[in-house]
Amino acid sequence: MDSWRTLYGYEMKKLLGRRSLWVVLGLCAAILVFSILTGLMGSFYGGGETLGECYEIFTAERKDRETVSGREIDQALLEEMAAAYRKIPPERLREGYEKTEEYLAFAQPYCEIFDLVRAWTGMNLRAAVYWEPKEESLYEARRWMVERYCRALGLSEEQKEFWMEKESRMPAPMRYVCNDGYFMIMAVWPAAGMWMMLVAAVGMSGIFAEERMRGTDRMILACSKGRGSLYWAKFWAGVSLTAACALLMIAVAACSAFCIYGTGGFEAPIQFYFPYYAYPLTMGQACLILCGIFVLTAVLDGIFVMVVSELTGSFKTTLVLSMGIWGIDLAAIIVCVRNPQIPQIWQYMPTTCLWERAIFDMRPAMLLGHCFTLWQTVPAVQLYYGILAALAGRLIYGRHQVRGA
């Protein structure tokens, strides 16, 4: 055990000494922070006109929304919302109505609730403004919306029953809570996953290949610890460092989002982000799920790079192949964005599964007659392939690491 710890410490020290890893990690972290900040940069346009600076508009809107944050979306709040929106002149109920004085003075605090009502009922702007608010009819409309959405997805009766049972557990009335920080964290993970693949490619490409490049592989494999303990020391050093980099990226994203957008909203229903979603999750729980999958995805990326490093014995070839997978992941995300009804196999791609609309898709996976959501099955699939790759790497290292062996 002591010898394994020594080997592990030595391999970890070698990885930590790679300047390229820290340069790429720092660059990716900076890009992640920039992605979170972009929503507050520049000017906001509506109706073909400039409505103001994004930061000023966000600050004013958030201040207004906080006046109703924490309240239940019940009959009283719906009536307040309807009365506020009806103060907007009828002739201004078109694109760009958000810049009217009446909207800014009266309706802005209820904007997210109003958008939720429209999403659940399917009403257009004018119909929603002059809708007679009824709490029971609103939540009934939501149940009908979920059922129609299940039919549109072509789900089986068993799958429909699964989602309708989850829908029956949804709280009614729901509670509105400002959740801008969690909203931003949800949105950045696909990009973060792409950059994490780059970090893994740069950091792990040489962990096995450098032995062959330096001509030390034969000597190492001839040692008593060369074929077994050393492999697992290298493997766990790579896994540990990749997971640590992923956790660092999570910390950077969380600190940036919470410092800028606030920490409130953990208990906000995810339905403010996905109006159609029928699982009783909060925004905080959804973010924790994505964070966990992000770490697993990063570890899987690192394992893939290490195994390719063994097979090719070349740092450059491993880096090129890793970037090829990076490109496939990017293509998968583009396909997901443009074609929401894509086959589910695409949603298991390492980075695509971090896209919030993929991982919280309402097409459940069937296993032994039971339904499971994607955020329940993706971690299991990743762990399975990670274990297979680790064992395959062990066989490769022991038999084919040395040329001609």
Image (tube, rainbow, N blue to C red):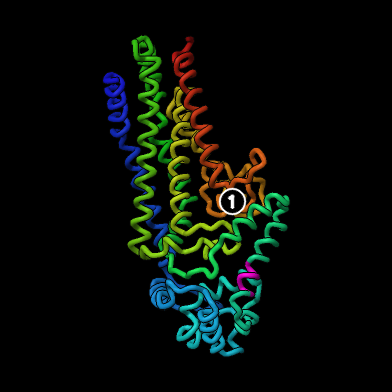
Q: Is residue 6 visible?
A: yes
**Residue ID at (30%, 29%):** 14
Horizontally, residue 399 falls left or right of residue 372, namely left
Is residue 173 magenta-colored? no
Q: Give, as a single range, the part of the protein colored magenta.
A: 137-142
Q: Which residue lies at the image location 45% right of the left edge and 31% below the top edge?
A: 303
In this rendering, the answer to whether 363 lies above or below 129 is above
Q: Is residue 39 left or right of residue 47?
A: left
Crowding at dot 1, Cα within 10 Å, few <14 / some 14-19 / many 20+, comes out as: few
Residue displayed at 67% across by 46% down = 343
Instruction: State the image quarter where residue 255 is shown.
Output: bottom left
In this picture, is 95 found above or below 391?
Answer: below
Residue 381 placement (x, y as % from top left): 55, 37
**Residue 339 seen from this side:** no
Tell me which residue sits at (46%, 83%) in the image: 104
Which secondary structure is most common in the magenta stretch? helix
Which is nearer the eye, 384 or 30?
384
Q: Amino acid at mark 1?
A: Ile
Instruction: Write down the residue under mark 1.
Output: 334
Residue 69 percent location from the top left of the image: 43, 73
Give the image location of residue 124, x and y in percent: 65, 76
Residue 137 in the figure: left or right of residue 315: right
Secondary element type, mark 1: helix
Q: Magenta stretch containing residue 140, yes or no?
A: yes
Quadrant of the image containing the N terminus: top left
Identify which residue, 111 or 364, lies in the foreground: 364
Asked if residue 119 is positioned above or below residue 300 in the image, the reply reads below
Q: Nearer the viewer, residue 368 or 32?
A: 368
Please state which of residues 374 and 356 is positioned toward the viewer in this rendering: 374
